[in-house]
Every structure is written in structure tokens, then in C-alpha cells.
Amino acid sequence: MKKLMTLVSVLALTAGAAAAEEIRVGVSPGEHAEIMEEVAKVAKPMGLDIDIIEFSDYVVPNQALADGDIQANSFQHKPYLDNQIKDRGFDLVPVATTITTPMGLYSDKVKSPDELKKGDSIGIPNDPTNGGRALLVLQDLGLIKLADGTGLVPTVLDITENPKKLKFQELDAAQLPRSLADLSAAMINTNYAIAAGMNPKTDSIAMEKPDSPYVNIIVVRKGDENADWVKPLIEAYHSDDVKKFIEEKYHGTVLTSW
């Protein structure tokens, strides 16, 4: 009887191991990576093993997903995905919303946007969506005015008023924190600010309004929307444990969508 129970136990463990599914999820540094670590903890008892793949920029995660190197990614907002699909033809779809991370204006030289002087240099992301987002924030701050009808993706060419004659340097979003020494100020995404050791709430000199359209999303390849692993991935992300982790760790600088 003892041998039989041992055999049954082994078979049960084997069946459990076979039932567990493993997926690779691409993230960017900072809060996206940190939150996904918590999601993985919640997902594991649900039979889903998440292998987190961290990418250092915003370009590769969608290409890796399209190529089948990962099964999902969690790093971008819908306007960015839409632009990537338009430019690169990716067959990708969002399956859930996650968090909102307001973009911030950071500076080692001034304490507020009003202190910026004529001809100062401002760093903005060089990808169209986040670069446009940065310009919209700068317009909200009264530093520039943009042409009507540019939507969510204005460029520096759409600036119609620039009273301080600010000079804009378009850089890779990941490089902006370490470029602050050479700039008067920079518009930096929250994930890269956190990854660089900055606190968005206390270190930024201005923040994007919280009602922006830039809620982040979980993205998969078209056709995988109903894959077995999608539901537990979303349920794990939208769990109370993950929500509590976000609220306690980021103190309002990262906002949940659920």
C-alpha cells in the first residue's frame, strides 16, 4: 500500500508539472519589470510560470513578440502600439490594461519649469509617440504651443510658439536620465526614471496630468487572445496582491487601471 501511495504521489506531481504552462513576457526596466515579478508570484499557484525578459529600449519588445521570441509584453501604452503597428506592420493586439505612469520633467539645473531660460535645451524621447507625449506635457506647462490637429503625435515641427526659444534634443528614451548633466531639463518616462534611481514624485519638477490617454497594456500576437495562458496572466496582474504592491511601493506615482 505504501508503494502504491508513493507511485500515486509521483504520478500526481508529474501531472501537476505537465499542467503548468510557461510563457515569456517582455518588459522594460523599472516599474514594469518590478510589477511583473509580483505578477509571476501570483500566477505560479495558478499553474502559470512567467519567465520575465527585460529589454533596455522600447523598440525590441514588439519585434520580439512578433517574431515569437516571447508570448506577451507589458511595457507600452495604446498610442505607442498603434504607431508601431502603423510603421512596422506588427500583427499585435492588446488584451488588458495595466498601469498609468505619468511622464515627468526632470532637471539638475532648475527647480521649476518657470526657471528655464531662453535657449535652454530640453531632452525628449526620439520615438514618435513618447516624443509627442512629451511635447503635449510641455504645452500643458505653458512652455510651448502646438499646431491644432496634431493629435497625440506632434513633432517639434508642429511647435508654433516657443517664447523661450527652447532647443529640443531627441534622444533614446532610456538615455535621457543619464543625459540630464548635458541638458537643462528632460521629459522622462516613469519606468526609466525609477530604473535610474529617481523618485518621480519628489525628483520631477513637473508631472503629466493623471487623466492622460496613456494607460499601459498587455499585448499578445493576434490569434493568441484566447490562449489558455492569457486569462490567468490577466487575473494575476489584476489581483489584489499586485494592486497592494503597486500602491505600497510607488505611493501614487504609478496608478492602477483596475
Image (cartoon, grey):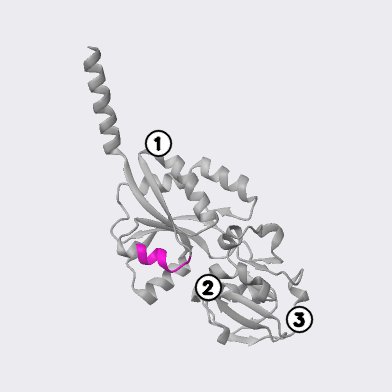
Is 62 inside the magenta-drawn segment?
yes
Q: Position of residue 92 (x, y in %)?
A: 35, 64
Q: Which mark is drawn over residue 172?
A: 2
Measure the C-alpha gap from mark 3 to mark 1. Answer: 55 Å
The residue segment tinted magenta is 57-64
Pointer 3 or 1: first along the chain = 1
Measure the C-alpha gap from mark 1 to mark 2. Answer: 38 Å
Secondary structure, magenta segment, majority class: helix
The answer to whether residue 258 of the structure is visible from this angle is: no
Q: Which mark is drawn over residue 212?
A: none
Q: Are marks 2 and 3 in contact (CB under 8 Å)?
A: no
Is 70 inside the magenta-drawn segment?
no
Q: Which residue is under mark 1?
A: 45
Q: Nearer the viewer, residue 103 or 37?
A: 37
* Res 185 quadrant in image: bottom right
The answer to whether residue 53 of the structure is visible from this angle is: yes
Binning the other alpha carbons within 10 Å of mark 1 as few (below 14), some (14 to 19) or many (20 upward) gives few
Binning the other alpha carbons within 10 Å of mark 3 as few (below 14), some (14 to 19) or many (20 upward) gives some
Q: Position of residue 181 (x, y in %)?
A: 67, 72
